[in-house]
């Protein structure tokens, strides 16, 4: 049976420089080894928030597909290079059977998706959408969104084989504004390593446990103050995401700041900057920044637990089998933690607690039993939803409850329906 040729689009998977030529079997370029400010600025522009890489790589890791004939491609970059929507349509139709849009918190008042809408409007290839969600709560009308975003959401609702959204609140809002095919499937980054997520258990290190944190330390606020107060008496390391660029610029091209081989950020250079911004002592032992997900996961595997208010910082840790507590302060993280029953706490509820207090109260056997039960249900729905369109996940069937043989009965029929020319 012919496996589908899939084009994955929109979010990055790594810090790599896309090739702008048209040579068969060409590959993107790795980032330069030198940690100059110029290189750091360009690298950060490729990924923006490094948490986006988890979403970008997710389905390409776990779908059964024709890997040599599938790829990642940012459609809006083609538009920026001068490609017309019609040229994009024709090239995609020539080379691919399916387009997968990997989205994030793109339903927001200050974010116009008009360029992407232009590309989608011309598509003749079947496509699916995953992970899109609201940035904040919205009133019950589409008119509050930019015009381009309105067009894109309507096209997703009308044309997508699957219109997968982040959680129930996003699903309910979209249904309320008349986009009734939206279906809560969660963020696909949680389905990449189900064996590791299902094996997560309470940490055993006690007061000597090593912690990983991440947050928004370049943004002086209650949430950043709460985060550093949690770790006053803990052995902890801090992983930066998009705030790394602000630190690099403040250090004025001091190439000692960052070791590209290890991900280590020099503590003696960045700690004073954070302390000046926040006006408080920073308790973290070391600071890190990862431009590659495998390196990030390997580092997390050394820790006993994660505690922070970066959602995908916690998911990286759980992909490595490390228990996580998610601090939320907005719609995005709350919706996802609720959808998967992940251990979580709001910034407002932290009070005077320390990190190990939250570990004792939130990372319990009961909490992980609830998470595992919920996770299996979510994964089962995800597998069945894809299976309805002839797409299978390349994961061990023991991690979900759908009968694989039932799915196979519909694969040939659905491939013929959706992938024209399939034999």
Image: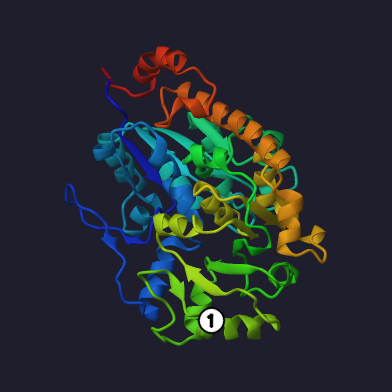
- In this orientation, which residue lies closer to the viewer: 420 or 187? 187
- Figure label count: 1
Q: Nearer the viewer, residue 201 or 318?
A: 201
Quick one: quadrant of the N terminus? top left
Q: Residue at x 72, y 67 (%)?
A: 230
Disc 1 crowd rating (10 Å Cα; few below 14, some 14-19, many 20+) is some
406 lies left or right of 157: left
Front-lying residue, 43 or 122: 43
Q: Is residue 182 visible?
A: no
Is 70 placed above or below 235 here? above
Name the spot of residue 313 as percent of width and height, x first: 56, 57
Q: Residue at x 18, y 48 (%)?
A: 25
Give the residue displayed 51% in from the left and 31% down from the top: 162
**Percent of width and height locating residue 112:** 55, 55
- Scheme of image coloration: rainbow
Residue beneath disc 1: 270
Q: Quadrant of residue 396?
A: top left
Q: Is residue 22 visible?
A: yes
Among the 4 quarters of the image, the one containing residue 366: top right
Residue visible at 41% across and 74% down in the picture: 41
Residue 301 coordinates in the image, percent (x, y): 49, 55
- Tell me where residue 79 appears, x and y as whole percent: 36, 54
Q: Closest to the observer: 166 or 156?
A: 166
Relative to 227, residue 35 above or below? below
Q: Which quadrant does the C terminus fall into? A: top left
Helix, strand or loop status at disc 1: helix
């Amino acid at each position: 049976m012919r496996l589908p040729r899939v084009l994955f689009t929109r979010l990055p998977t790594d810090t790599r420089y896309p090739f702008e030529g048209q040579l068969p079997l060409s590959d993107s370029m790795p980032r330069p080894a030198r940690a100059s400010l110029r290189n750091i600025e360009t690298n950060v522009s490729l990924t923006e928030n490094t948490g986006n890489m988890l979403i970008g790589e997710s389905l390409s890791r776990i779908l059964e597909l024709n890997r040599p004939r599938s790829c990642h491609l940012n459609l809006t970059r083609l538009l920026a290079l001068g490609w017309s929507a019609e040229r994009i349509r024709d090239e995609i139709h020539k080379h691919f059977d399916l387009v997968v849009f990997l989205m994030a918190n793109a339903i927001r008042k200050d974010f116009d998706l008009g360029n992407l809408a232009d590309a989608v409007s011309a598509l003749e290839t079947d496509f699916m959408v995953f992970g899109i969600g609201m940035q904040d709560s919205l009133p019950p009308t589409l008119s509050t969104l930019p015009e381009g975003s309105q067009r894109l959401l309507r096209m997703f609702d009308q044309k997508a084989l699957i219109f997968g959204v982040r959680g129930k609140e996003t699903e309910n809002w979209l249904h309320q504004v008349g986009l009734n095919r939206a279906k809560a499937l969660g963020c696909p980054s949680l389905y990449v390593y189900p064996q590791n997520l299902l094996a997560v258990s309470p940490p055993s290190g006690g007061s000597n446990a090593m912690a990983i944190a991440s947050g928004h330390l370049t943004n002086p606020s209650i949430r950043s103050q709460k985060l550093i107060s949690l770790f006053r008496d803990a052995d902890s390391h801090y992983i930066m995401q998009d705030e790394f660029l602000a630190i690099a610029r403040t250090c004025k091209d001091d190439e000692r700041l960052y070791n590209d081989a290890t991900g280590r950020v020099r503590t003696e250079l960045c700690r004073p900057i954070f302390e000046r911004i926040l006006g408080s002592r920073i308790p973290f032992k070391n600071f890190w920044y990862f431009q590659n997900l495998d390196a990030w996961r390997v580092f997390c595997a050394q820790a006993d637990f994660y505690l922070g208010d970066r959602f995908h910082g916690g998911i990286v840790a759980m992909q490595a089998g490390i228990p996580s507590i998610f601090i939320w302060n907005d719609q995005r993280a709350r919706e996802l933690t609720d959808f998967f029953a992940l251990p979580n706490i709001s910034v407002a509820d932290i009070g005077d607690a320390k990190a190990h207090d939250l570990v004792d109260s939130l990372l319990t056997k009961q909490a992980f039993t609830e998470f595992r039960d919920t996770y299996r249900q979510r994964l089962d729905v995800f597998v069945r939803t894809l299976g309805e369109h002839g797409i299978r996940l390349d994961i061990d069937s023991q991690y979900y409850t759908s009968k694989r043989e039932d799915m196979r009965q519909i694969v040939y029929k659905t491939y013929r329906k959706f992938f024209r020319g399939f034999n």
